[in-house]
Image: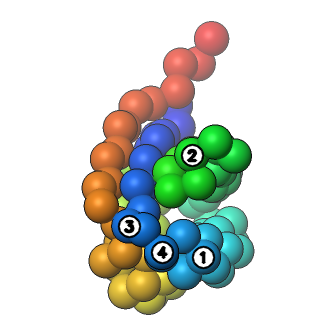
Amino acid sequence: MAFVCDATWVVKEGRIDLVREALRRLTAATREEPGNRYYQPHQAPDEPAVFRIFEVYDDEAAFEAHAASDHFRRFALGIAIPQLESRTRAFSVTLDV
């Protein structure tokens, strides 16, 4: 089973480009993490202030390592998250079927 995080970020007005750039840099670094299987941010054209991030890790420990990484602290905690109106996350595990 893999560990999954499905995050939704709602960005403050006027901060979309800043968050998009932070996500671009965060994504590149995250995809290089040994425990990351998939990391894909996306944005609906009709909701430009809403970013969704679908993340899959080998296990919860790999997700926790991601959250403790320098690039997460720099790009997510340091740049993007302060620009958000809200942030929600849902966690699950994959089914081996």
Amino acid at the residue labelled 3: Lys
Q: Earlier in the sequence, mark 2 or mark 1?
A: 1
The residue tagged 1 is: 17
Residue 12: image tag:
3
Quarter assignment of residue 27: bottom right
For the residues labelled 2 and 1, the Cα–Cα distance comes to 14 Å
Asked whether 65 or 40 is in front, the reply is: 40
Query: Residue 91 location, x and y as percent?
Result: 36, 37
The residue tagged 2 is: 47
Q: Earlier in the sequence, mark 2 or mark 3?
A: 3
Q: Say which residue appears at 52% left-offset and 27% top-offset.
A: 94
Q: Residues within 10 Å of mark 2 (few under 14, many from 20)?
A: few
Q: Look at the numbered discs 3 and 4 and tell me whether their residues touch, using CB distance below 8 Å.
A: yes
For the residues labelled 4 and 2, the Cα–Cα distance comes to 14 Å
Q: In the picture shown, does residue 6 fall above or below 24?
A: above
Q: How many marks?
A: 4
Secondary element at tag 2: loop
Q: Say which residue appears at 32% left-offset and 54% top-offset.
A: 87
Asked whether 28 or 17 is in front, the reply is: 17
- Say whether residue 4 is left or right of residue 88: right
Secondary element at tag 4: loop
Q: Say which residue appears at 60% left-offset and 76% top-offset.
A: 17
The residue tagged 4 is: 14
Q: In the picture shown, does residue 46 fall above or below 41?
A: above
- Say whether residue 32 is left or right of residue 22: right
Visible residue check, residue 65: no
For the residues labelled 1 and 4, the Cα–Cα distance comes to 8 Å
Q: Earlier in the sequence, mark 1 or mark 3?
A: 3
Q: Earlier in the sequence, mark 4 or mark 2?
A: 4
Secondary element at tag 1: helix
